[in-house]
Image (cartoon, rainbow, N blue to C red):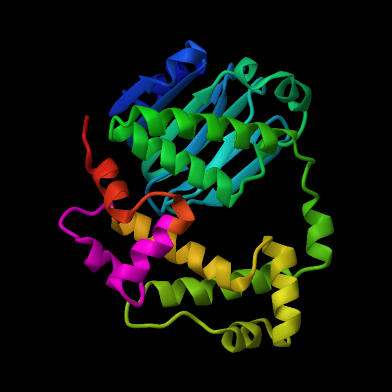
Amino acid sequence: MKVVQQTIASFGSPIWIEPLERSYGLGAVIARWRHINGRVGISTADAIRVCLSLSTGQQVRHAERDRALSTQILAGDVKVLRAGIPTETTVEGDADVVQIFIQPESLGQITSDTLTGMLVAPTSGELTRAVVQLFVAARHDDWKRRCAAEVRLRQVVRELLASPVDDASERARGGLPPMVIRRVEQLIAGAMNRSDSASPNLTELAATARVSINHFIRAFRCARGTTPHRFVMTRRCQLAMDLLRQPGLTVADVSDAAGYSSPAYFVASFRQRLGVTPGAYQRAVARKG
C-alpha cells in the first residue's frame, strides 16, 4: 500500500510491521512507530488508517481540504482516517503509535459510499477494545486470537464509516459549554495526576460546572456521549496504559499510581474495558522486535 510507504518516508522505519490475516491477501498491515515530531502528507490515501496511541502528550493535527482536527492525544486514543482523501497529519511531541492500514475494498461497498463524510470517523469503546486486542494478539504471536480480533476490528470500522456524520453543534445545544467541559476535564485530570487523590465525585463536578447534579449528568452525557463515571474510568484506564509502558513498574505499582482501589480490581476493570489483562498489554508494549 502506497500510504504505508509514505508514512515510512515521513516518520522513518517502524519498529515492527507485518501483514495481517493471510486470507485477506495484503488487505491490511499493522505497524508500530516511535518518533519525535513529524509530518506526513498523503496525496490520496489508498487505505483506511486506524491509529492507536500508546503514549500521552503529543499534539496531533489532521488537515483535509478546508477542514482540520487538532487534538491532544492520550494513551488509548484511537482515530480512524478515511481513505481516498488527501490529508496532512502533523505530530508534535514524543509519539508511540500503532497504525493499522486497511484496504477499503476488503470492507465492502459501504466504505466507498462514505468518503465524502468526515475527515475522521467517530470512535467508540468497541473500537479501542478491538484495536488493543489485535495489537496484543499480534505481539504475542497468538494466531487464533489475532484472526478473531482482526475480523472484529473490520466489523467495527465498517460500522463507524457507515454511521451518520455527527452534528457537533446540535449536540452542543443540549450539553455544557465547551469552556465548562474543559474545566470539568481539568479537574478530573488534576486528580488523576495525584496518586493520593480520589476521583472527583458528582457533587464536585457539578459544582465546577455550576449546575445541579441531575442537570450535570444529562448535559455531560449529551456533550461527551458517556456518563461522568464512565468518562472518569476511561481516563483512569488511559493513565494506566501510559504507565504500563514504563520499564520497571509492576502491575501492582501501576494500579496504585493510577488510583485503583486494589491490583485485583485494576486487573478486572482493565480486562473488562479492553479485553486483555494489564500484564498481557505490558508485555506487548515492552516487546522490541
Vertical order, 132 against 47 (above or below): below
Q: Nearer the viewer, residue 85 or 123?
A: 123
Q: Residue at x 42, y 41 (%)?
A: 133
User: Quarter-wise, where is residue 203 in the image?
Assistant: bottom right
Boundaries of the magenta span: 245-271
Task: Kindly indicate the quadrant of the structure image that contains residue 242.
Answer: bottom left
Furthest toward the front, the residue is: 144
Residue 38 appears in view: no
With respect to residue 19, does 167 lie above or below? below
Relative image position of residue 69 (x, y in whole percent): 63, 44
Quadrant housing the C terminus:
top left
User: Could you say which is closer to the camera, residue 66 or residue 19?
Assistant: 19
Res. 32 image quadrant: top left
Residue 42 among magenta residues: no
Seen at 42% across and 64% down, the residue is 269
Q: Residue 258: x and y, percent?
A: 35, 69
In the rendered image, residue 227, in percent from the top left (x then y), is placed at 64, 69
Report x, y in % for residue 172. 78, 62
